[in-house]
Amino acid sequence: HGGWGFGAIVVDPYGNLKPSSRIDLNIGNLLATPMKELFLNHPIMKKLRDGKFEKCQDCDFRSMCGGNRNAAFAYYNNIFAKDPGCWI
């Protein structure tokens, strides 16, 4: 799953927490909510850690790939959608 929801988060200059620097998806603002709260308890972050993405959740290669969440968001406006570039 590429570390989404586990080892990578982005904070923009305004304090907005995002799961990636490549998409405009705000999880919350650190000026209003502690990072620990957002990272551990926000529904999007929890769902990212569950790895339940369209098509990927049943794929044999999920642990090695997990699909491109940035591409899914760009194409479908949904980070949990299937990777539009998946060949499987």
Image (spheres, grey):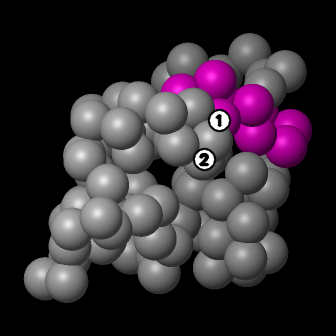
Position of residue 19 in the picture relative to residue 15 (left or right): right
Q: Which mark is residue 44?
A: 2
Residue 41 place in picture, x, y as percent: 49, 33
Which residue is at a point 66% across and 59% down the rendered structure image? 79
**Label of residue 47 in the image:** 1
In the picture provided, is 66 more to the left or to the right than 58?
A: left
Question: How many angstroms separate mark 1 from mark 2 (CA)?
Answer: 5 Å
- The residue nearer to you, when weighing 86 against 34, is 34
> Which residue is rendered at x = 80% and y = 53% of the image?
82
Residue contact at pointers 1 and 2, CB within 8 angstroms:
yes
Q: Which amino acid type is marked by label 1?
A: Lys
Local packing at callout 1 (Cα closer than 10 Å; few below 14, some 14-19, many 20+) is: some
What span is colored magenta in the figure?
47-56
- Asked whether 77 or 55 is in front, the reply is 77
User: Looking at the picture, does residue 24 appear above or below residue 48?
Assistant: below
In this image, 87 relative to 39: left or right? right
Most foreground residue, 39 or 8:
39
Residue kind at label 2, given as amino acid type: Ile
Q: Residue at x 38, y 75 (%)?
A: 22
Q: Mark 2 Cα within 10 Å, few/some/many (few <14, many 20+)? A: some
Question: To which quarter of the image does residue 3 belong?
Answer: top left
Up the image or down, 43 lies above or below 24; here it is above
